[in-house]
Amino acid sequence: MILIVIQAQIRPDRHDEWLAGIDEYTRKVREEPGNISFDYYRSGTDPYEYAIIEVFRDSEAGAEHVKTAHAQQFFVDMGRWVTKKPNLNYQDLPGDAWVEMGEVTPTND
């Protein structure tokens, strides 16, 4: 499983373009056969900071993703929308890498 987290600071004057672009990109990435999930989140403290969280089946699916026309176009577009180079955290995790959270147990309350 590939887990990618991107932190991006968006230009205030291009924020509306960003929102339209990330919405379209999200839809296209979610249609990829190797994509497990793709979501983006706005910071609770900075209205122009976003986190993008992507999960792909494996490194092959991740490699195929970056070759797609929509990814290549998004990289170009994102260059116009950000104030600085985004930060990226890339994790190649074994198997599906999910484990149960030990601190929480469901109740019938």
Image: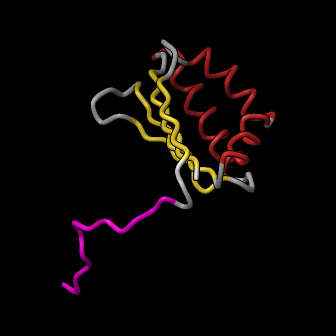
Closer-to-camera residue (10/72): 72
State which quadrant residue 80 falls in: top right
Please provide percent x and percent y for residue 28. Answer: 71, 45
Q: Main secondary structure of the magenta part?
A: loop
Question: Quick one: which residue is furthest to the front in this view?
Answer: 94
* Residue depicted at 52% across the width and 47% down the height: 39
In the image shown, does 86 or 11 lie closer to the viewer?
86
Residue at left offset 68%, top offset 28%: 74
Horizontal side of 46 relative to 51 (left or right) equals left
Q: Is residue 78 above or below residue 43?
A: above
Quarter holding residue 9: top left
Instruction: Locate residue 71, reporting x and y percent.
Output: 72, 33
> Can you give x and y, in whole percent of width and height, for residue 89 in the image?
48, 33
Residue ID at (26%, 68%): 102
Q: How is the image coloured?
A: secondary structure
The quarter of the image holding the C terminus is bottom left
Against 66, residue 55 (above or below) is below
Please give the count of numbered marks on the rendered protein.
0
State whether residue 13 is above or below residue 5: above
Q: Position of residue 22 (x, y in %)?
A: 60, 35
Q: Foreground residue, 1 or 24?
A: 1
Please say if 103 is above or below 24.
below
Residue 28 colored magenta?
no
Residue closest to the far left: 109
The residue at the point 44 percent across, 35 percent down is 51
Image side of residue 98 versus residue 72, left or right: left
Looking at the rendering, the stretch of residues picked out in magenta corresponds to 97-109
